[in-house]
Image (cartoon, grey):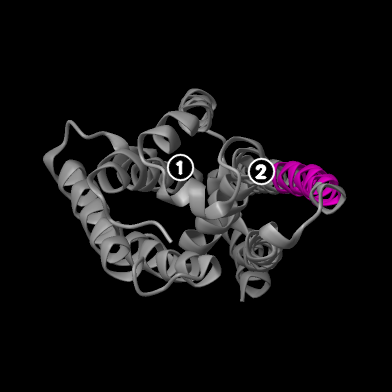
Amino acid sequence: MDKPTFINVFLVWLPDLAIYLTLMLLVAGEKKFLDVRKKTNLFKFVLSICVLLIVMIIERPFVPNFVFNMLILTIVYLLMLVFVYKIELYRAMFSIAIVLLISITMENMYTLFLITYVFEGLDDFLLSQWPKFFAILPLRLLQIALIVFLFKYYIVFVSTKLNRKINIILTSILMSITLTDCIIVVIFHEYFNLMTVFHRIMCFVVMIIITLFNFMVLKLVFEITKWTIESGSKQYHDLESDAKWLFFKIDGLLQSNNTDEAKLLISRLKDKLD
């Protein structure tokens, strides 16, 4: 497992934590918290990163299992989003689920390629310091490009506020897929040295299929959130049109001193609302 060396802590873990926290805030629809010109936003971001980094430094030497590492960090991310940024629990869980699936989809193929063909095994990959740092730079650039994309287009995942049930269902599906992916990666790491070339090729084929499936799931999530906000927007405009007609009708009745019919209309509206 990674040791808390200077290179790992400040050149590998710290950028990872900052990138993932930024992505989670963007997906949660909280772009305003990334305006670090405000001292409160800067303080919250630095505090969250420091807590996450301290947790990583403490737990990495004692928790060698990749899945447990991910679960521990997921809990800490959730605590930061809920208690530091005051984001609703279900929205925080949804944003974490999205970012974890995106990250593991981006990292799986590339990291497995490095382990197999560049570092000749997981141990060599983890023990390397500067080589590992330079090897993951392309992945880091891809993560930064994703942040720039989300900043530019600001994908409206805020639409999940409109339907909590959809949010919970999507979060459960995304977390299940991410956990399954992690277990497959752990199996690959554990049995890497025992694998023949054929087994490694088959593992890559499986990972390609899983990666494509993950992209399809992410695409589906984008479409569902798009449909949710468009549906909510249509309902709002329909309600606004009905309200305008109703107020116009009541105003006309009052102008003509037909107060009884106006009262009857208001009474009917009240009954429907109740």
Q: Which residue in the structure is indicated by mark 1?
A: 23
* Region in magenta: 201-222
Secondary structure beneath label 1: helix
Left or right position of 97 against 219? left
Q: In this view of the protein, can residue 254 be seen by the observer? A: no
Q: Name the quadrant containing residue 260.
A: bottom right
Q: Say whether residue 216 is magenta.
A: yes
Residue 196 or residue 142, whichever sits in front: 196
Q: Name the quadrant containing residue 2.
A: bottom left
State the image coordinates of residue 98 (x, y, percent, origin top left). 59, 52
State the image coordinates of residue 122 (x, y, percent, origin top left). 56, 53
Q: Say whether residue 55 is magenta.
A: no
Query: Tag 1: Cα neighbours inside 10 Å, few (<14), some, or many (≥20)?
Result: many
Q: In this view of the protein, can residue 65 be seen by the observer? A: yes
Secondary structure beneath label 2: helix
Left or right position of 80 against 259? left
Residue at (34%, 68%) from the top-left corner?
A: 61
State the image coordinates of residue 267 (x, y, percent, origin top left). 62, 70
Q: Which mark is residue 187?
A: none
Q: Which residue in the structure is indicated by mark 2?
A: 116
Q: Quadrant of the N terminus?
A: bottom left
Residue at (66%, 68%) from the top-left corner?
A: 172
Rendered view: 224 above or below 174: above
Rendered view: 82 above or below 27: below
Three-letter code, disc 1: Leu
Q: Compare marks 2 and 1 and give the one earlier in the sequence.
A: 1
Magenta stretch, main secondary structure, is helix
| Residue farthest to the left, as pictured | 39
Residue at (61%, 42%) from the top-left corner?
A: 244
Rendered view: 28 above or below 114: below
